Amino acid sequence: MLDLLTYMHGKNVVHRDLKLENILVDDNMNLKVADFGFATFKKIHALKSYRGTMTYMAPEIKEGKTYDGVQIDLFSTAVILFIIVQGIFPFKEAKKDEYFYNLILKGDLETYWKKTGGQKLSPEFKDLIIKMFSYDGSKRPTVDEIKNHPWMQVPIDMKQMRENILSNIEEARTASTASSTRQDTTSRGDIMLDLIRQPASESLQLRKFNYMQENDIDVHPGVIWDDLQAFNFEKCSEKLQLEKVDGKYIKMVLPAEPSEDGAGVDLVIKVKFFEIEKANGENPGRTRVRFVKKSGDMQQWYELYK
């Protein structure tokens, strides 16, 4: 990615919409960047147009300031890097009044890393990413400074890494194929159609930042209930408390581990179902299943969902 930035900026071009959706790879895991619809090659160090994607945009764009296109590409790259390392967005928006970004701005990094589940990330990574998230674009490290940062100095066998990634992709494809040919499309008990809600404004709302996960399914809610029971037995040593709240949702509770201060909070997840395609007889149609964290530790939630 840094090599790409060096090449692109060396041609006096800035992208202005770098994000995961615009990064492609070929069969050999060579990186490609797509969608230059917001790119420009004119006055790239003194731009004013409002361009980009909300969660990847640098603060100076949001505030309507004149900005350096090179610096805002680096900010978007930092968001990409954070997601690759941590698996979540670092903040909803890079605005002073946004809770997570404000923690960075005021230097409350202990709270920030706790809230984003990054306590165990290396000091080197934390140092680099916080610098790349600087509110002042001129204080963000350049590509060369990033390349020379201690976090980037760990030796990497790129050939072996590519082979590992390709192997993981193949395993995922195999698992996906097996899942798509699943035979167990009926539940052992109640199919729980009463849990499926009609399409409503709630099902169309933007996903609440990092607290929600959605998947589309073509089985009855009762099958998901059976799967959760099996998951509880196989992965959670039956610590999960599962409850069907009639006509509403499935409630999952993972009790907090005992602690010296007794301040633990139970992890509570609601599993809701929304109709996409009507069921027809034995055909369950298509349903959107939504997992929503209502309370509890953020890191626990990420690990449980994975």
Image (cartoon, grey):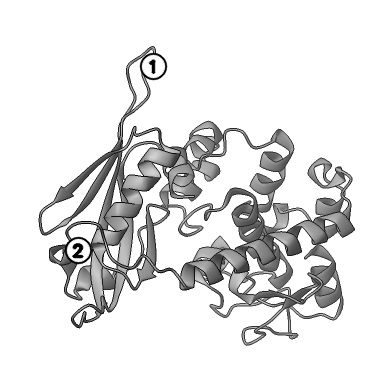
**Mark 2 lies on residue:** 191
Under circle 1, the secondary element is loop
| Amino acid type assigned to the residue bearing label 1 in the image | Ser
Residue 93, which numbered label?
A: none
Q: List x then y, in percent, for residue 277.
A: 26, 82
Q: 10 Å neighbourhood of mark 1: few (<14), some, or many (≥20)?
A: few
Q: In terms of sequence position, does the residue under pointer 1 or pointer 2 come before the other?
A: 2
**Mark 1 lies on residue:** 259
Residue at position x 73%, y 69% in the image = 70
Question: Is residue 172 or residue 65 the one in the foreground?
Answer: 172
Q: 298 above or below 291?
A: above
Quadrant showing the N terminus: bottom right
Q: List x then y, in percent, for residue 14.
A: 73, 77
Q: Farthest residue in the left direction?
A: 246
Q: List x then y, in percent, for residue 15.
A: 69, 77
Q: Is residue 201 rendered to the left or right of residue 291?
A: left
Marks 1 and 2, Cα distance to the nearest angstrom? 39 Å
Question: Is residue 149 or residue 121 the one in the foreground?
Answer: 121
Tag nearer the camera, 1 or 2: 2
Under circle 2, the secondary element is loop
Q: 10 Å neighbourhood of mark 2: few (<14), some, or many (≥20)?
A: some
Residue 243 visible in the picture: yes
| Amino acid type assigned to the residue bearing label 2 in the image | Ile
Residue at position x 64%, y 72% in the image = 18
Q: Is residue 275 rendered to the left or right of residue 90?
A: left
Question: Is residue 144 or residue 237 the one in the foreground?
Answer: 237
Question: Is residue 52 or residue 274 the one in the foreground?
Answer: 274
Residue at position x 36%, y 46% in the image = 230
Q: List x then y, in percent, for residue 301.
A: 41, 43
Q: Is residue 148 rendered to the left or right of residue 189?
A: right
